[in-house]
Amino acid sequence: MSTATAPGSPELRGFKRLWRVSKQIFYETVGAIFAILALGWLNSAFRAWTRDVALWLIAVTIAVALVFIFFAVSSFRRARSL
């Protein structure tokens, strides 16, 4: 089994490889946490919508969920770009 690397990129070894892997795991974990929080906020918005709560409260919860979704996607994209 051979590990082929791109012609222009040297293979990472030692601490640099460990640092890259730990950054990638960190970004993936943070992305997953933000995604779970976004689902919680969307659940809260849906429950408020079914109970006839004020529309501005529903809009605020959806806005917070969208911010969390943005952070989750950007964190996963950053982990992928490493």
Image: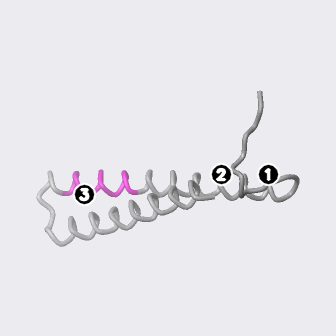
CB atoms of marks 2 and 3 within 8 Å: no
Residue 34 as seen in the image, left or right of residue 3: left
Residue tagged by mark 1? Answer: 11
Tell me the distance, in whole angstroms, between the alpha carbons under discs 3 and 1: 47 Å
Q: Amino acid at mark 3?
A: Ala
Q: What secondary structure do most residues of the magenta stretch adopt?
A: helix
Which circle's residue, 3 or 1, is located before the other in the chain? 1
Residue sitting at the far front: 7
2 vs 3, front mark: 2
Toward the top, the furthest residue is: 1
Which span is picked out in magenta? Answer: 38-48
For mark 3, does the 10 Å Cα neighbourhood hold few (<14), some (14 to 19), or many (20 or more) residues? Answer: many
Badge 2 amino acid: Ile
Q: Nearer the viewer, mark 3 or mark 1?
A: 1
Q: Quadrant of the C terminus?
A: bottom right
Q: Which residue is identified by label 2?
A: 25
Q: Earlier in the sequence, mark 1 or mark 2?
A: 1
* x, y percent for residue 49: 16, 56
The residue that label 3 is drawn on is: 45
